[in-house]
Amino acid sequence: MDLRRLGEKILTFFAVLMLYGIGNAWAQEIGSIIEFTDLIHDFGQINEADGPVTHVFEFENKGKVPYVIDFVSVSCGCTTPEYDKAPVMPGKKGSITITFDPAGRPGTFNKPIVITGNDRKDKVTVSIIGDVLGRPKTVEELYPIPLAAGLRTDRNSFLFGYMGRGETRSRSIEVHNSGNTPVVVSVVTEGNLPESAYSLKVIPETIAPGDSGEIMFTYDFSSDDVWGLVSTNVYLTVNGKKADMSLSAYATVTEDFTKWTQSQKENAPSAEFSAQFHHFNELPKGVTVEQKFIVVNKGKDPLILQSIKPNSSNITCTVNRREIKKGESAEITVKLNTSGLEGRVSESVTVIMNDPSRPMRELRLAATVK
């Protein structure tokens, strides 16, 4: 081998590497510098009903090499970029068009757009901001649940949450007559409470076309001995025709802890369960199995088990004591009868106590019945 020629090749190789490195560094140093006319565009107030709006961000390549938009990233599908991938030569201008669709987006918005160019080396962020004035909603959007004869509502439940014994509370559901004739509304109820524990009123009973009314439901636990989960079904008749959709009221009745003194709060009972779930695995039909749950009073004053209710006729339960003193325990025996059940089943028992931290607990049983 000619050592002289080999040496020349090696020198040439390193010379190319050096020139490449110097050239690359020089290109980065004097590379593309783009300057936008504006980095933020404020659309101000726009109407959702008017549809998409567009703004053109213009820029100038003030560098010494061509600039190419490599890709553009946006924060959501409501923002669409349009741009040309042709190189923008030094001293020349380019642009990127941003379209914002306000459909379903009422309120203020701030959408950043990240523009990456020249092999992902250059990044610039521009933004569009503004405030969308929501379009007027249709009757069907405001009241999506049809009842009968053009009467519609926005929800089908009166939700009361926790209520203290002795408390009276009302909830209402708005109804709207979207038809062309007046509607007369009447109600009947069905539930697990005495009639003295609730009341119902339609205001007004006759609702003119285009007008709204309300159905007022009141739970009154001032006199009846009611504990735990309660529910009441409300069936509507509109112009003599039963409505397709029924309404429901739900509440969980516990002790009224808002009336407790500071001393009662400091000495409150505290329930701790050995478990709140048990799975029997596979069970045959027509058998009865049982599971024991232990509850210990970790507080100071006696813990009172005020209500123990199974959620179905397949569940029965007994307890060996209702009042549990400090440090003592009670045993709740829950029995599951698999008659009439098949496949995966889940049953529960609701326990109501005078533990202010968690007055309601559920004991759940599960199995696969074959």
Image (tube, rainbow, N blue to C red):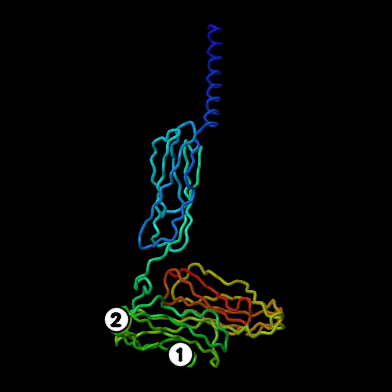
Q: Nearer the viewer, residue 150 or 354?
A: 150
Name the quarter where the C terminus is drawn: bottom left
Residue at the image position 52 percent from the left and 69 percent from the top: 280
Q: Give the SS element for disc 2.
A: loop
Residue 275 appears anywhere in the view: yes
Looking at the picture, does residue 74 appear above or below residue 365?
Answer: above
221 displayed left or right of 234? right
Q: Position of residue 15 (x, y in %)?
A: 55, 18
In the displayed structure, would residue 112 be above or below residue 304?
above
Which residue was labeled with disc 2?
Answer: 149
Which residue corresponds to mark 1? Answer: 199
Nearer to the camera, 71 or 34: 34
| Residue 146 coordinates in the image, percent (x, y) | 34, 76
In the drawing, does residue 361 fall left or right of residue 209? right
**Residue 321 showing in the rendered view:** no
Comparing 45 with 175, the one in front is 45
> For mark 2, does the 10 Å Cα neighbourhood hold few (<14), some (14 to 19), or many (20 or more) residues?
many
Q: Amino acid at mark 2?
A: Ala
Percent across and percent down for residue 28 are 53, 32
Q: Amino acid at mark 1?
A: Ser
